[in-house]
Structures are given as C-alpha cells and as structure tokens.
Image (cartoon, coloured by chain):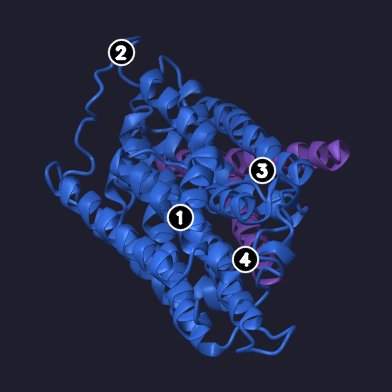
Chain colours: A blue, B purple
C-alpha cells in the first residue's frame, strides 16, 4: 500500500488506541477514590486527565522497539502495526463494554503478536520473551498486589481501630487523593510514551524520520492529548466494576488498595520489571476486600475479571491476526479494516447507550447480587 | 526468566506497598489521638509527634515516587 496513505492511517489508529487506553485505565487510578467519595467523579477524571497529560511530557524515554522484543522487529511492517493496533482497540472496546478491567498493554502485545504471526510466521514470535515479559508478570502482579493490599488493609484497620471513627475516613480519603494522583502521573508517563514509540518507529520505518530520532513535538503533544481525552471521558463502566463490583470499599480499604498498588507499580518499574497497572490495581482491591474483617468479595465478578486477563493476549492476537491478514492484502484490504474497525467502534458505543454508566450512576450498586458473607464492613470506617 | 530479579521485585514491592500504608495509618492514628486530647482540653504530644513523623515520611515517599517517575 502507498505509504503516504498507510502511515497517516497508522498514526491515527495509534492515537485511537491511546484514547481507548486512557478511558480503559482511568479506573486504575480513580475507581477507589470515586467509590469512597474521596473525590467527586467528574473531579477525579479531570484530575487524572491533567496528570496523564503532564506525565506524557515528563519523559521522552519512548519504547525503542514497537513490540518490546516480543516479536522480531525486522518482521514488523506498517501493515502489521496497523493490524496489531486494530486488534488491541477491538479488545479494549469489548472489555470496556462489559466493564472488565484488562491490560491495554497486553492487548497491544497480543494484537502485534497475532499480526506478526500471520505476516511472518511463528518463527518471528519470541515465545520465551512472551513468557518472561507478559505471562509471568501477569500472574505475579495481581498476587503481589493482592497480598500487599490484604496485609496493608488488615494492618490499617488494626492500627486505627481505637481512633475516633469520624476522623479516620477523612484522613484516609486525603491519602487516597495523593496516591491516586501519583498513579495517574506514572500512567501518563508509561502509556502515552508507548504510543509515542509506535508512531515514531512507524515514521522511521517509512523514512519520514532519520533512524534513531526521538519523537517530534507533534507526536508528544498528540499522544498526551489523546490519552488525557480518553481519561477524561471516564471509562465509567470499568470504574464501577473496580470501585463497587469486586468488594465494598470504605476509606481504609480504598486507601490501602490504592497506595499499596501505587507503591508496587513504582517499585517494580524502578527495579526493571514493569507490572501491568490494571492487574496490580485490581489485585490490590481484591486483596483489600479479603483483608477487611467480615469482608464481602463478589467472586463472580472477580472470576470474570481474571478470565478476561487470561484471554486478553490470545483474543487480541486473533483480532490482530485477522486485521493484519486483511491489511497485508493491499490498499483495499487496509481501508476495509479501517472502515470495519470504525463501524465496530460505533456499534459498541451505540450498544453502550442502552445501559449507560456515567458520573451520575457510577456508584450505584452492581448488577451482581452479594451472595456470601454479606455483613457490612466492620469498624464504621466508611 | 530471571527469577532472582523477580523475587527482588516481589519483596521490595511488598515492603513498600505495606510500609506506606502502615506509615499513613500510624499518622491517622496519631492525629486522631491528638485531636481527641485537644477536644478534652489537653494535649497528646506522643500523638502529635507520631502524626508529624509519619506524615513527613509519607510526603518523602511521595517525593521518591515522583523522582522514580521523572527519572525514567
């Protein structure tokens, strides 16, 4: 296909992915703050959007490979990147529609692996790296965050059990705002740069930029704005699931889940093993529920969430493979994929209007009834 | 797979995750004790001290967090 058409198409698709990444991941930083009332819903998403935008400008250490070494980068063409991005967007929209938090990074990796496999064969996929960089961290992240969130919640309750009940929640809510802000900043730095890296490397491969170039200013600005706009849109469905669907969150649990997740993410990132923000935050919330005396944990919702994590990589891979295969067939195929992708996105949006979740009803009781140990959270620290 | 590095990350992440929450909870407890004492017409130097030290360490942790983000 003519690169003058394909490259702009890849750039726009990468920005659309960035946008879906933003609204898919707002919940990671803000779900517990919204659930406990530490921040009003609109204020929470606005704060998160601004910090994501700031984060995008904090570092220009963009990804040096599109796939992070999961596939042979020599096999990656603009058509493969396009197919991979479409696969990731499709999966992000589907999981958003059903309100399930799943990793946008894993969706992107899955899409790229699928599209590369179809274009260059299975030899171009580095399965050992896939296990090391995706599968093992995918298991480790929620377990570590869950254990940290559970123990932290238990200790927070123990330490404050003799404190005046009216003062404790206020203190924890203030702490929540700080940890949620820190997480939003880190998210903007990490995830906006992923898109910047994809666009920059696509421009280099097309000869629009010299090899070894950093991202041009327009790429930094557009990636930052796309993720911030997506974040501001809110992703209310996933916010409801994380904030209300897994467990009943009071201020101590919300603070413990949020802060332990933030600490786990920053520590692991600093030590060189990047754990999925989504998995860490969800694991932290589940752990906080388990660490609460007489806790209510909705295992049905938690089970669906884990299932979504397990199938994210293969599902996005299949979607990416299909999109990549059609895009590889030529100009008509690429345009057909773009049109089908836009129609799919529009259809999901229209379907979502039938049972809209917004800032006004995000804290309503989840659909799934509580069936076990339905006693209220102890201690009055709500 | 470098299991040693992963183990290091797990231990460090668990320590900081739990440590940060415990520190803040101690601050809340200290502040609550101090406020209760003031309401009763007295003062709780220990509560105030615990709150100040704990919250100061939490602010320092936030600073470290921002440094980790910016220094990437």
User: A286 left or right of A350?
Assistant: right
- Label 3 sits on residue: A134
- Label 2 sits on residue: A374
Q: Can residue B54 be seen here?
A: no
> Could you say which quadrant of the image residue A340 lies in?
bottom left
Kindly identify the residue that appears in the image at 36 percent across and 57 percent down.
Answer: A23
Q: Which one is earlier in the sequence, the residue at label 3 or at label 1? A: 3
SS at circle 1: helix
Q: How many marks?
A: 4
> Could you say which quadrant of the image residue A172 lies in?
top left
- Label 1 sits on residue: A323
- Cβ–Cβ under 8 Å for marks 3 and 1: no
As measured in the structure, the alpha-carbon distance from the residue carrying label 1 to the one carrying label 4 is 39 Å
- The C terminus of chain A: image quadrant: top left
Q: Residues within 10 Å of mark 4 (few under 14, many from 20)?
A: some
Kindly identify the residue that appears in the image at 39 percent across and 43 percent down.
Answer: A32
The residue mark sitting in front, 1 or 2, is 1
Front-most of residues B20 and A207:
A207
Q: Residues within 10 Å of mark 2 (few under 14, many from 20)?
A: some
Kindly identify the residue that appears in the image at 25 percent across and 58 percent down.
Answer: A343
Establish if B67 lies above or below B46.
below
- Label 4 sits on residue: B66
Front-most of residues A103 and A182:
A103
Q: Can residue B70 be seen here?
A: yes
The residue mark sitting in front, 3 or 4, is 3
Q: Residues within 10 Å of mark 3 (few under 14, many from 20)?
A: many
Q: Residues within 10 Å of mark 1 (few under 14, many from 20)?
A: many
Name the spot of residue A356 as percent of width and height, x first. Answer: 16, 46
> Could you say which quadrant of the image residue A89 lies in?
bottom left
SS at circle 4: helix
Q: Which one is earlier in the sequence, the residue at label 1 or at label 2? A: 1
Name the spot of residue A276 as percent of width and height, x first. Answer: 59, 46
């Amino acid at each position: 296909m003519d690169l003058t058409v394909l490259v702009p198409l890849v750039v726009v698709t990468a920005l659309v992915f960035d946008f879906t990444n933003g609204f898919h991941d707002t919940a990671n930083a803000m779900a517990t703050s919204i659930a406990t009332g530490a921040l009003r819903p609109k204020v929470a998403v606005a704060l998160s959007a601004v910090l994501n935008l700031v984060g995008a400008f904090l570092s220009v250490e963009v990804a040096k490979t599109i796939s992070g070494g999961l596939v042979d980068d020599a096999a990656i063409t603009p058509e493969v990147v396009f197919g991979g991005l479409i696969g990731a967007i499709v999966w992000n929209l589907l999981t958003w529609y059903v309100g399930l938090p799943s990793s946008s990074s894993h969706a992107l990796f899955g899409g790229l692996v699928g599209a590369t496999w179809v274009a260059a064969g299975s030899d171009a996929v580095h399965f050992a790296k896939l296990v090391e960089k995706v599968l093992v961290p995918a298991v480790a992240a929620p377990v570590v965050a869950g254990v940290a969130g559970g123990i932290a919640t238990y200790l927070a309750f123990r330490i404050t059990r003799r404190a005046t009940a009216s003062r404790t929640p206020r203190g924890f809510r203030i702490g929540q705002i700080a940890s949620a802000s820190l997480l939003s900043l880190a998210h903007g730095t990490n995830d906006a740069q992923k898109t910047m890296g994809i666009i920059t490397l696509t421009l280099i491969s097309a000869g629009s930029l010299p090899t070894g170039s950093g991202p041009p200013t327009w790429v930094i600005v557009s990636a930052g704005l796309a993720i911030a706009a997506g974040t501001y849109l809110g992703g209310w469905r996933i916010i409801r699931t994380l904030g209300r669907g897994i467990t009943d969150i009071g201020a101590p649990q919300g603070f413990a889940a949020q802060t332990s997740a933030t600490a786990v993410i920053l520590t692991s990132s600093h030590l060189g093993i990047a754990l999925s923000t989504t998995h860490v935050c969800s694991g932290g919330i589940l752990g906080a529920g388990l660490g609460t005396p007489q806790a209510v944990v909705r295992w049905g919702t938690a089970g669906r969430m884990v299932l979504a994590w397990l199938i994210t990589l293969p599902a996005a891979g299949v979607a990416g493979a299909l999109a990549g295969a059609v895009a590889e067939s030529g100009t008509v195929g690429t345009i057909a994929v773009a049109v089908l992708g836009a129609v799919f996105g529009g259809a999901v949006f229209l379907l979502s209007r039938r049972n809209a979740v917004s800032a006004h009803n995000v804290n309503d009781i989840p659909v799934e009834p509580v069936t076990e140990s339905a006693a209220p959270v102890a201690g009055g620290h709500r | 797979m470098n299991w040693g590095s992963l183990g290091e990350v797990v231990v460090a992440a668990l320590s900081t995750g739990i440590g940060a929450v415990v520190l803040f909870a101690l601050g809340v407890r200290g502040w609550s004790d101090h406020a209760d004492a003031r309401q009763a017409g007295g003062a709780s130097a220990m509560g105030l001290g615990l709150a100040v030290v704990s919250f100061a360490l939490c602010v320092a942790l936030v600073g470290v967090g921002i440094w980790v983000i910016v220094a990437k």
